[in-house]
Amino acid sequence: MPDNPVSRKLVALASSAERGVSPSVSDLLPAFGRRGWKVRSCVDWRQWVVGLEHRQMRLAIATISGVDPRLFGRLATIKTIAPSARPIVLIICPSGNPSLQSMALEAGADLTLPEATAPDLVVAQVHALLRLIDPTQDSAQLRAGIMTLDLSLRLLSVSKGNDRRETTVSVTESRLMRALFNLAHRPQTREALVAAVWGSDSRIQARTIDVHVRRMRRALARIGCSEMLQTVRGIGYRFDPD
């Protein structure tokens, strides 16, 4: 898998009985989108299979109203593959049908939920499963002031009263923010930040960090916090999350 297997891309398949994306899926997709997922929906079985077999997809969602031999057969062919090396599979079943959920899990689904499950709870369940499936990912959440950094999801969030804003960052910027979080309020040299992001034996030039700081500031600006990352003349940078 790539350096960060959690690519935050998903493909969703509506029930074959639906002409469009089924209500349970159409409610789910905006909830995933708000958490930084790139969403693709389809009603064609073949398109979903392509997504299921695409290594850059991290999640494949399908809704079923009963036993689907094609879907169950496909799950049987992939369930021997480690979930960290393929998309995880979420099956949405009709509410009040736990036996169908059990059959889907036996067939190879990683998670099954009833269609009445609240969208935000579905997203939370998927994120919790991702942390369990890939133990190589650091699932810790760092907090500094009003800012939180979810390392497994590369998600920055800020809470001001009832207002919560989120944005995703790249792998490199996530490492940069981790270094800044760990020594919040303290100036850090460019050399120290390069070592934290790429390792102490890296040949990366210290000024390279300036490029990533500019990108990081753009990410912070999306949640109204660009002023938190400050330049310290003659030294480097300081993160002030208060």
Image (spheres, grey):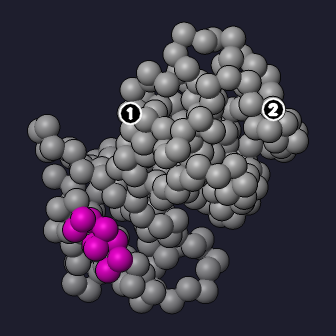
Give the mark nearer the N terminus: 1 vs 2: 2
The percent position of residue 25, horizontal first and vertical second, equals 48, 39
- In the image shown, does 197 or 191 lie closer to the viewer? 197
Q: Residue at x 52, y 65 (%)?
A: 171
Q: Give amino acid for label 2.
A: Pro
Q: Residue at x 52, y 16 (%)?
A: 95
How packed is label 1: few (under 14 Cα within 10 Å), some, or many (20 or more)?
Answer: some
Image quarter for residue 198?
A: bottom right
**Residue 218 is one of the magenta-drawn residues:** yes
The percent position of residue 236, horizontal first and vertical second, equals 31, 79
Image quarter for residue 204?
A: bottom right
Magenta highlight range = 214-222
Closest to the camera, between mark 1 and mark 2, is 2
In this rendering, the answer to whether 172 lies above or below 63 is below
Extreme-left residue of the structure = 161
In this rendering, the answer to whether 125 lies above or below 114 is below
For label 2, the residue is: 69
Q: Give amino acid for label 1.
A: Asp
Q: Residue at x 39, y 26 (%)?
A: 118
**Residue 112 is one of the magenta-drawn residues:** no
- Magenta span: predominant SS is helix
In this rendering, the answer to whether 195 lies above or below 174 is below
The percent position of residue 208, horizontal first and vertical second, equals 45, 87
For label 1, the residue is: 120
- In the image shown, does 240 or 44 lie closer to the viewer? 44
- In the image shown, does 216 or 128 lie closer to the viewer? 128
Q: Is residue 190 visible?
A: no
